[in-house]
Image: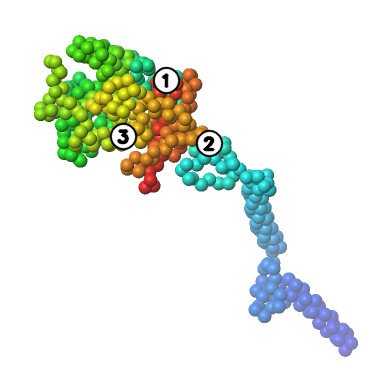
Amino acid sequence: MQNQQNKNTANTRTQNQNVSQRNRRTGQTRSTQTNRRPTTDTKYAPAYTRTTHPHQNRNIKRKKQRRGAVSGLAVCLVVMIFVSLSLLIVRSIDWDYIFSDKTRRPFENPENTVYGPYLTDAEREGYLTQYATVNAADVHRGSCILVNFDVPYIFEEEEDVYSVYKNKSKSYKVTSGSIFLRMETIQAMNSMMDAFYAETENRNVMVNSGFRNAKQQQQVYDSKAELNGADYAEQYVQKPGYSEHHTGYAMDLAVYDEGDLEVEGDEAMWTFNGKDEYFWIDQNCSQYGFILRYSASKEDVTRISYESWHYRYVGIGNALAIQNMGLALEEYINFIRDYSYDGTRYYITANNGDIYCLYYVKSNGSDGQKIPIPKTARSYQISGNNIDGFIVSALVGNEQG
C-alpha cells in the first residue's frame, strides 16, 4: 500500500512537472492559464505576445510580413531611381572629349563672355542667337537707306509719316502744321532738342522742312531753278525720286531770329549755320541718331554742296559709327559690308555707356529671310540699305553693367 502511494505521488509530481513545462512554453501559469507579461528579469523576451487565440498570433505575423514587403518595395524603388539618374548622367558626358587631347577652337567673343568647355558651335548658335524675319521689299525700308543721285527712293503706296507740330516737345518750333516726319525721327528730335534746351535754354531752333512727295519735290526744284538757275538747283536740291526728303528721315532746320534773316528773292529763310551755341547740335546729334548729311568735307562724295541745316536720322548706332570715322552715308554703306554676324562685328559706345553692335546681312532676294540678332540685345534696328542688304544695329549692353 505504501508503495502504491509513493508511485501515485511520483506520477503526480511528474504530471505537475510536465504541466509546468507546458505552461512555460505557452506563457500560461499553472493556476490561472491566462496571459502573463514577461517580467523584467526574464532572460529572453518573446518576439511577440502570445495569446490563447492562435488566429491573433497569425494576424500579427501577417502584419509584420506586409510591413517588411512594403519597406522592401520602397528600397527597390529608391535604388531604381538612383540607377536611372546615374545612367542619364553618364550618357550625357562627352567621354570622347574627356579622353581626347584635342582642344576646341575658341570662337570670337568680343563681349568676353565665358562659356562651358563643352559648348559646340550649334549650341552656341542656339544660346546666343535669335532671329527676325524680313521680306525682299524691306531692303528699301529703314532709317539707314541710301538715297542720292544714283540710288532712287522706292515710294510706298501710303507713307507712314506724322505731323511734327502735333507730336513735338516744347523745346523747339516748327514753321507750319503741314510738315511731316516718321515718328521715330520726331521722337529722336524731341530727345535731342530737350537736351539742347537744358544745355542752352534756347528754343529758337525750328523745323522748316520734312517729308516731301514727288510732286512737292518737283515744286521745290523748279522754284530753286527759277530763282537761282539750274546749276544752283543741282547743287542744293535733288530731282524728284532722288531726294532724302522722300524718306521721312530727313529735315531742314532754321533759326527763329529776325536778326539773322536772309532773303533770297521773294523767299525769306532763317538760316541755321551750326555756329555758336548751335554747334552743340553738330557735336551731339549722333548721340540721338542724327548726322549732318551734307558736310563741307564730303562734297566730292555726296555731290551736294555743304548744307549746315540738313540733318538725317539713321539710328543711334549707325550715327555714332558715321561720326566716329568721319564718313558720309555713302561711305558708311560700303564700310559696314565688311562686318557680319558670324565674322567680325563693329562695336561703338555712346556717351551714356550704351554699347552698339553693328553688322551687315546680304539680302537673299526672297520673303521670310531670317536675320540673326544677338540674344543679349536689349533692342535692335534692322534697316535696308536700299541696294543689296540689311544693316543691323543692336544695343547689347552698357559699360556700367
Label 2 vs 3, first from the N-terminus: 2
The spot of residue 95 in percent (x, y) is 67, 46
Q: How many marks?
A: 3
For the residue pair 240 and 98, the one nearer the viewer reads as: 240
Relative image position of residue 285 (x, y in whole percent)? 28, 34
Q: Which mark is residue 315?
A: none
Can see residue 49? yes
How many angstroms separate mark 3 from mark 1 (CA)? 24 Å
- Which amino acid type is shown beneath numbered disc 1? Ile
* Secondary structure under the numbered disc 3 in the rendered image: helix
Calculate the distance from the C-alpha at mark 2 to the C-alpha at mark 3. 32 Å
Tag 1 residue: 387
Q: Residue at x 26, y 34 (%)?
A: 282
State the residue at coordinates (28%, 32%).
Answer: 188
> Where's residue 295, x and y in %?
29, 27
Amino acid carrying mark 2 in the image: Glu
Reading the chain from its start, which is encountered first: label 2 or label 1? 2
Picture layout, residue 264 above or below residue 185: above
User: Quarter of the image holding residue 290?
Assistant: top left
C-alpha separation, residue under disc 2 versus residue under disc 1 = 28 Å
| Residue 207, quarter of picture | top left
Mark sitting on residue 286 = 3
Mark 2 or 3, closer to the camera: 3
Query: Dot 2: within a 10 Å radius of its alpha carbon, few (fewer than 14), some, or many (20 or more) residues?
Result: some
Above-or-below relation of 131 to 198: above
* Residue 378 in sight in this render: no
Q: Which residue is mark 2?
A: 125
Q: Amino acid at mark 3?
A: Ser
Q: Are marks 3 and 1 in contact (CB under 8 Å)?
A: no
Q: Secondary structure at mark 1?
A: loop
Say which label, 3 or 1, has the lower sequence index.
3
> Is 83 placed left or right of 134 in the picture?
right
